[in-house]
C-alpha cells in the first residue's frame, strides 16, 4: 500500500513538472486539480518537514523528471495540437470548480471574501486581455555569452515565474514569455546548459520559498479568503488559456475533449 502511495506521489510530481513548462498553465492549478495543493504547503512547514520528506522528495524527483523529459516533447505537442490541449485544460479547470467552491463554503461566505473572488477574477481577465507580448523566441544562439547582466535577468525572471507558478490560475511560465526567456529556458533544459540553468534555478528557488511562506500564512489565518481568491484565479485562467474556436471537425473534437475532461476531473476531485 505504501509503495502504491509512493508511486502516486512520483506521478503527481511528474505531472506538476509538465505543467511548469506549459505557457498559460499553472503548476498551482495542477496541484489543485490533483488535490495536493494544501498538502504541499503544509508539508513544507518546518514542524512537518521531516515527517513529509519522503512525499516531498518523490514529488520533487517526479517534477524534475517531468521538466527534463517533456521540455522538447511538450513544446512540439503544443505547436502541433495547441487548440486540443488547451480545451482539455479548460475542461480540467471547469471540472475542479465545485471542489474549490466546496472548500471556500465550509461556512457562510463573507462579503469581503466575495470581493476577493472578483478582484482575482478581474485580474486574470486583464491578463487575458492585455496578454504577454515579450519576445519569447530568444534562443540560446541569439543570447550569446552569459554575462552578469544576463544572469541577473534570468534570476529575476525565474523568481517572478516561481512566485506566480505557486498561485493556482496564474502561469509562472507566462512570466518567462514576458521576460523573453521562455525559449532560452526550454533549450537550456533540453541541452542541460548549466550557465543559464543555474541563475534560473536560483531565482525559482528564491521565489518559491517566498511564495510558499506567504501562502501558508493565508491558509492558516484566512482559508476562506484564500480559496475565494483561488476560485477567481482558476475561473479567470480559462480566459488566458482559451485558444478561440474553429467550426467543423476541429471545433467539435475540441468540445468533446473539453466535456470528457470536465467529467473526468469532477469525478476525480470527488474521490480525491
Image (cartoon, helix red, strand yellow):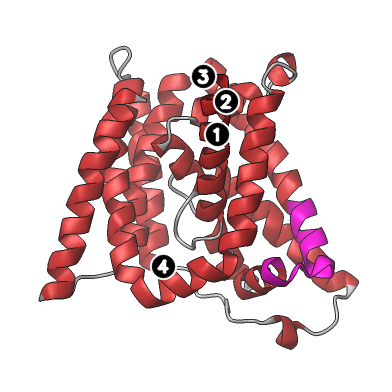
Q: Secondary structure at mark 1?
A: helix
* Tag nearer the camera, 4 or 3: 3
Q: Vertical placement of 27 versus 53: above or below?
A: below
In the picture, the disc for residue 7 is 1
Horizontally, residue 49 falls left or right of residue 69, namely right
* Tag nearer the camera, 2 or 4: 2
* Upstream in sequence: badge 3 or badge 1: 3
Neighbours of disc 4 within 10 Å: few (<14), some (14-19), many (20+): few
Q: Alpha carbon of mark 3 to alpha carbon of mark 1: how far? A: 10 Å
Q: Alpha carbon of mark 2 to alpha carbon of mark 1: how far? A: 6 Å
Region in magenta: 189-203
Q: Alpha carbon of mark 2 to alpha carbon of mark 4: how far? A: 46 Å
Q: Give residue 148's position: percent from left, percent from top.
A: 89, 70
Marks 3,2: beta carbons within 8 A? yes
* Upstream in sequence: badge 4 or badge 3: 3
* Upstream in sequence: badge 2 or badge 4: 2
Q: Give residue 182's position: percent from left, percent from top.
A: 61, 70
Q: Vertical placement of 72 versus 214: above or below?
A: below
Residue 242 visible within the image:
no
Q: Residue at x 41, y 67 (%)?
A: 130
Q: Residue tagged by mark 2?
A: 3
Q: Vertical placement of 136 versus 105: above or below?
A: below
Q: Residue tagged by mark 4?
A: 130
Marks 4,1: beta carbons within 8 A? no
Instruction: Indicate the quadrant where residue 54 lies.
Output: top right
Marks 2,1: beta carbons within 8 A? yes
Horizontally, residue 201 falls left or right of residue 261, namely right
Magenta span: chief secondary structure: helix
Furthest residue in direction bottom, as rendered: 142
* Tag nearer the camera, 4 or 1: 1
Amino acid at each position: 500500500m505504501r509503495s502504491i502511495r509512493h508511486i502516486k506521489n512520483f506521478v503527481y510530481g511528474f505531472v506538476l513538472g509538465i505543467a511548469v513548462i506549459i505557457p498559460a498553465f499553472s503548476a498551482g492549478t495542477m496541484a489543485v486539480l490533483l488535490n495536493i495543493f494544501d498538502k504541499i504547503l503544509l508539508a513544507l512547514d518546518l514542524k512537518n518537514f521531516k515527517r513529509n520528506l519522503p512525499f516531498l522528495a518523490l514529488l520533487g524527483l517526479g517534477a524534475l523528471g517531468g521538466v527534463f523529459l517533456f521540455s522538447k516533447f511538450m513544446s512540439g505537442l503544443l505547436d502541433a495540437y495547441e487548440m486540443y490541449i488547451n480545451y482539455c485544460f479548460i475542461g480540467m479547470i471547469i471540472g475542479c470548480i465545485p471542489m474549490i467552491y466546496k472548500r471556500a463554503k465550509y461556512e457562510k461566505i463573507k462579503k469581503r471574501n466575495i470581493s476577493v473572488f472578483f478582484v482575482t477574477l478581474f485580474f486574470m481577465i486583464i491578463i487575458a486581455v492585455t496578454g504577454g507580448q515579450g519576445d519569447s523566441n530568444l534562443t540560446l544562439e541569439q543570447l550569446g555569452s552569459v554575462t552578469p547582466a544576463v544572469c541577473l535577468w534570468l534570476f529575476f525572471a525565474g523568481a517572478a515565474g516561481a512566485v506566480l507558478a505557486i498561485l493556482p490560475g496564474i502561469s509562472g511560465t507566462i512570466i518567462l514569455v514576458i521576460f523573453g526567456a521562455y525559449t532560452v529556458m526550454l533549450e537550456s533544459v533540453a541541452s542541460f546548459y548549466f550557465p543559464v540553468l543555474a541563475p534560473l534555478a536560483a531565482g525559482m528557488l528564491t521565489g518559491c520559498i517566498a511564495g510558499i511562506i506567504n501562502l501558508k500564512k493565508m491558509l492558516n489565518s484566512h482559508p476562506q479568503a484564500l480559496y475565494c481568491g483561488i476560485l477567481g484565479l482558476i475561473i479567470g485562467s480559462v480566459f488566458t488559456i482559451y485558444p478561440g474556436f474553429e467550426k467543423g471537425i476541429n471545433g467539435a473534437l475540441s468540445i468533446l475533449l473539453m466535456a470528457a475532461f470536465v467529467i473526468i476531473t469532477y469525478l476525480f476531485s470527488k474521490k480525491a
